[in-house]
Image: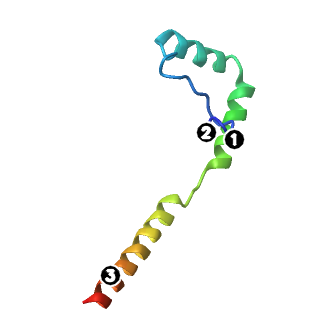
Amino acid sequence: MTRAGAGRLISEVELTAERLTGEIFLLLDQPQEIEKLSTAARRLARPCAARDIVNLIEEATKIQGNLQRASA
């Protein structure tokens, strides 16, 4: 998400309560930056992701079942 401009990354080494609080207040003072992050995040959205994953699993299950029946 960071590479796509949809988020910010604070490394674990740098992550402190003060740093996180500073980032939050910085964003709160820059609504246009929040909007840019939000827009970029929406571009990454996959509204049908859960359905697509289920379809892939069902297809893989069918293939596996066919292979097992063929070898029996």
Residue occupying the point 52% across, 15% down: 14
At label 3, which amino acid type do we have? Gly
Which residue, given by chain and number where applicable, does mark 3 sit on?
65
| Alpha carbon distance from label 1 to label 3 | 41 Å
Question: Which dot, 2 or 1, sits closer to the camera?
Answer: 2
In x, y percent, where is residue 18? 51, 9
- Marked residue nearer the N-terminal end (2 or 1): 2
* Residue neighbourhood size for the residue with mark 3, other residues' Cα within 10 Å, grouped as few (<14), some (14–19), many (≥20): few
Report the amino acid beneath label 1. Answer: Ala
Q: Earlier in the sequence, mark 3 or mark 2?
A: 2
Q: Residue furthest right?
A: 32
**Residue drawn at 64 percent across, 42 percent down:** 41
Alpha-carbon distance for marks 3 and 2?
37 Å
- Residue occupying the far left of the picture: 72
Q: Mark 2 points at which residue?
A: 1
The residue shown at (41%, 73%) is: 60
Residue that badge 1 annotates: 40
Distance between the alpha carbons at the discs numbered 2 and 1: 8 Å
Q: For the residue carrying disc 2, how many other residues have a C-alpha within 10 Å: few (<14), some (14-19), or many (20+)?
A: few
Q: Is mark 3 on a helix, strand or loop?
A: helix
Q: Do the residues labelled 2 and 1 touch (CB within 8 Å)?
A: yes
Which image quarter holds the C terminus? bottom left
